[in-house]
Amino acid sequence: TQLLEQSPQFLSIQEGENLTVYCNSSSVFSSLQWYRQEPGEGPVLLVTVVTGGEVKKLKRLTFQFGDARKDSSLHITAAQPGDTGLYLCAGAVDYGQNFVFGPGTRLSVLP
Amino acid sequence: GAGVSQSPRYKVAKRGQDVALRCDPISGHVSLFWYQQALGQGPEFLTYFQNEAQLDKSGLPSDRFFAERPEGSVSTLKIQRTQQEDSAVYLCASSSLGGTRSYNEQFFGPGTRLTVL
């Protein structure tokens, strides 16, 4: 059983469209991170959220941490081909614990 | 270099062969992590070092897996008597901070893709 679930598993959209991907768990997290991983590379950290209800923006990306700190979403506005990649969420149940990764959402943005 | 490097990038091993995977973290980084990423999955934690001390090896799947970081910089992950289920990408990450691990940014290397025939 996955501690973290991500949906959708795959997403293919046209350039310029908006999209939202989700990260859900039955566990409460002290912090949650989002990463993007491109083929043949390691994951690159996009954001860390620590407060329930927190919203962070990174250019066209908006990250939200659920009020109960059990879930998170990533919204991309006007997607571009450069956004293509595997989006991973990772949560730490307790401060000082290792992050556990979800299975990822594989996004493909077509020109 | 400026980032985390790993070698080799690709390794093909025959079942039963021993392999050694190397990680060069960012200079000065205290913490070093190893992860295993199976095809289509997220990374799974294997082990964690703070300097030369291996503080957590709870993720190592069997006693065939062994990791070391003798001088607190370069680390080696060794897999003995490889099995087909060991086929995966092995990722190394380093972090500038030690102690508690939450909130610390981990910088990942490109990984070593291991294929066991």
Image: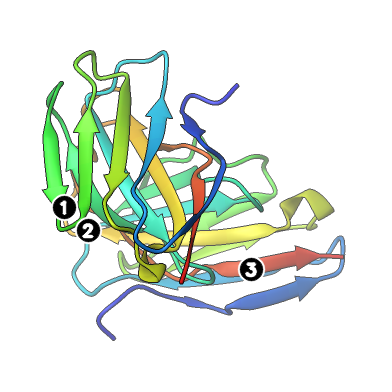
Is disc 2 in contact with disc 3, using a CB cutoff of under 8 Å?
Answer: no
Horizontal relation, residue A56 to residue B17: left or right? left
Who comes first in sequence, dot 3 or dot 1? 1
Residue A10: give x, y in percent of width and height.
Answer: 57, 46
Residue B98 versus residue A36 in the image, above or below: above
Name the chain under label 1.
Answer: B
- For image coordinates 21% across by 33% down, the residue present is A64
Secondary structure beneath label 3: strand
Q: Foreground residue, B114 or A31?
A: A31
Question: What's the mark number on residue B30?
Answer: 2
Residue under pointer 1: B97
- For image coordinates 26% across by 72% down, the residue present is B26
Pointers 2 and 3 within a single chain: yes
Horizontal relation, residue A34 to residue B63: left or right? left
Secondary structure beneath label 2: loop
Q: CA distance from mark 3 to mark 1?
A: 27 Å
Name the chain under label 3.
Answer: B
Horizontal relation, residue B19 to residue A35: left or right? right
Who comes first in sequence, dot 2 or dot 3? 2
Residue A102: give x, y in percent of width and height.
Answer: 47, 37
Kind of residue sitting beneath label 1: Leu
Horizontal relation, residue A35 to residue A47: left or right? right
Kind of residue sitting beneath label 2: Val
Q: How is the image coloured?
A: rainbow
